[in-house]
Amino acid sequence: MLVRFWGVRGSVPCPGNGTARYGGNTACVEVRCGDRLLVFDAGTGLRPLGNSLGHSASDVQADIFLSHCHIDHIAGLPFFAPAYRPASQIRVWAGNLLPERALAQVARTVMSEPLFPGAS
């Protein structure tokens, strides 16, 4: 088993020299169990994780588990490069949404104007 922390910060990402030791991105933890890739939370740390995966494989199979859908735990989703590769299989799980909300609705809201650049 391998565990790597890509982001450990709370509500506001704060990358820089002062946070280099523990990381400045918001919550994102990579866990590898054999060939299984599990990701816990999709904060801003998800972007560098995705970039790292881009160097090792053309397709990625991963399960992303969201502890909750606050912005600091989902901000990395639109910037996770493997999600844009047709051969990748990314499953995103969130079990704490109220019955009248769905994860797809959360993602569409975050990636829509005026909240997200280039949204249409």
Image: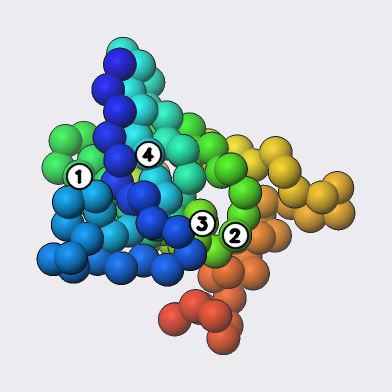
Eye-nearest disc, 3 or 1: 3
Tags 3 and 2 in contact by the CB under 8 Å rule?
yes
Secondary structure type for disc 3:
helix
Q: Residue at x 24, y 66 (%)?
A: 15
Within 10 Å of the Cα at label 3, are there few (<14), some (14-19), or many (20+) other Cα atoms? Answer: many
Q: Quadrant of residue 88?
A: top left
Q: Quick one: which residue is furthest to the right in this view?
A: 100
Report how far apart the C-alphas of labels 3 and 1 lie in the structure: 18 Å
Within 10 Å of the Cα at label 1, are there few (<14), some (14-19), or many (20+) other Cα atoms? Answer: few
Which amino acid type is shown beneath numbered disc 1?
A: Ser
Q: Which residue is mark 3?
A: 74
Q: Which mark is residue 89?
A: none
Q: Which residue is mark 4?
A: 29
Residue closer to the observer: 30 or 56: 30
Which amino acid type is shown beneath numbered disc 2?
A: His
Q: Quadrant of residue 26?
A: bottom left
Mark 3 or 4 closer to N-term? Answer: 4
Location of residue 5 in the rendering, given as x and y in whole percent from the top left corner = 30, 41
Report how far apart the C-alphas of labels 2 and 4 lie in the structure: 16 Å
Report how far apart the C-alphas of labels 3 and 2 lie in the structure: 7 Å
Q: Which mark is residue 70?
A: 2
Secondary structure type for disc 2:
loop
Report how far apart the C-alphas of labels 2 and 1 lie in the structure: 24 Å
Report how far apart the C-alphas of labels 1 and 4 lie in the structure: 13 Å
Location of residue 13 in the rendering, given as x and y in whole percent from the top left corner = 36, 66
Which amino acid type is shown beneath numbered disc 4?
A: Val
Tags 3 and 1 in contact by the CB under 8 Å rule?
no
Mark 2 or 4 closer to N-term? Answer: 4
Q: Which residue is mark 1?
A: 52
Q: Is residue 50 above or below residue 78?
A: above
Mark 3 or 1 closer to N-term? Answer: 1
